[in-house]
Image: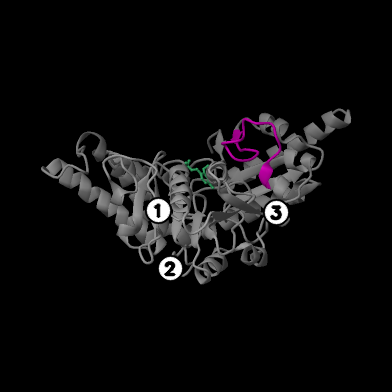
Amino acid sequence: MDLPIYMDNHATTRVDPRVVKEMVPYFAETYGNAASRTHDFGWTAESAVEDARERVADLLGAVPKEIIFTSGATESSNLAIKGVAQANADRGRHIITQATEHHATLDSCEALRRQGFEITVLPVDSDGLIDLDQLSESCRDDTTLVTVMLANNEVGVVQPFDDIGAICRSRDIVFHTDAAQAIGKIPIDVETAHIDLLSLSGHKFHGPKGVGALYVRNRPRPRMIAQMDGGGHERGLRSGTMNVPGIVGLGSAARFAQDELATEATFLLDLRTNLHNQLRDGIDGLHLNGHIEKRLPGNLNVSFDAVDGEGLLMGLKEIALSSGSACTSASLEPSYVLRAMGRSKVLAQSSIRFGLGRFNTQEEVDYVVPRVAEEVTRLRHISSGTAA
Ligand SMILES: Cc1ncc(COP(=O)(O)O)c(C=O)c1O
């Protein structure tokens, strides 16, 4: 087993070597612009982009023309949320979201609030789940968009997206979901879940960084305003020269994710269960954050009594873990996700997120558990003033 061990697969994932292999020719051999219509370089690039579009669509139960390529989930969510809100402002200016969303969603909503939109932020319970009755009650005649993430990036909690979709559909409200963490981890069918818009990102499921997609339902097609002006690429919704190698990588990652989803989910769930059980058996005062079952198979988020999470991470230098989302890990504020779930400031500050992925092994789990137990004991001795 090699050190360091990477267990931060919610921040990003290793690009699968099989994906890299499929991408490589598109840098220096097949390097045409997919929008060039007058020669073979362009046609070959365009055909690679269309193959990838089909693969991404297949993974979601969508059709290829419903896939818009972007630079990642942040851009997809900005386009979906601002694009729908602005295009439907004549119908209403009320949007519903929830408290544990990623900043790509929260800050897009905040930008709309500054433009005069009204935002309802639903709370979550102690398991991290929204209340469906409260969602129903919050829907109004002037509500044009509900944006609720599929799975949380810190605690892995999976929201009841089928029910949310049904509620939105019955009220003719557009439903957008940020599925950046869920894609390739749990089965998603945009038809059965009544999802109208879905954001995804390549680097969260063993594809490359800087490429993602927005699924945009074709029937009925939500009214949307593009957020990027230019050459009118991607059905006018996302101008800009296409990132052909990245898109090929995204398509390749989508295919492997689809082919291997069932076996990988079982593998990750077994690994996560072992990790959780072993940690619980070896460490007193361990608290699970997030619903035990309604969560991504590869996610474990725990807090420890009387331990500072940052100190713990510093003591575990050979293991790549995090205390929350990579975007906010530079801040010393306790996680807003855990705080929204009602965790005390102290417990929120002692949290550790384990993100298991395709390339982790049981051997790594067996190494990590005693190391975490050892560090927790050491830190508790220091804080209680006794020698370890
Ligand atoms: C839930 C969620 N949404 C959105 C994003 C942003 O994705 P990207 O890095 O592709 O912009 C992330 C990544 O951290 C995420 O975890």
In the image, 347: left or right of 24?
Answer: right
Q: Main secondary structure of the magenta part?
A: loop
Which dot marks residue 383?
none
Q: Which residue lies furthest to the front in this view?
A: 90
Spatial CA distance of label 1 from label 3 is: 47 Å
Asked whether 327 falls inside the magenta stretch, the response is yes
Q: Which is more foreground, mark 1 or mark 3?
A: 1
Q: What stretch is highlighted in magenta?
A: 319-337
In the image, what residue occupies the spot 68% across and 52% down?
276
Q: Which amino acid does label 1 sit on?
A: Met
The reply to whether residue 97 is visible in this rendering is yes
Residue 9 position in % (x across, y down): 53, 43
Q: In which quarter of the image is residue 125?
A: bottom right
In the image, what residue occupies the spot 34% across and 45% down?
238
Camera-nearest residue between 282 and 276: 276
Q: Which residue lies furthest to the bottom in this view?
A: 170
Which dot marks residue 191?
2
In this rendering, the answer to whether 13 lies above or below 280 is above
Which dot marks residue 224?
1
Is disc 3 surrounded by few (<14), some (14 to 19) or many (20+) residues within 10 Å? few
Which dot marks residue 277?
3
Counting residues from the N terminus, which is met first, the one under dot 1 or under dot 3? Answer: 1
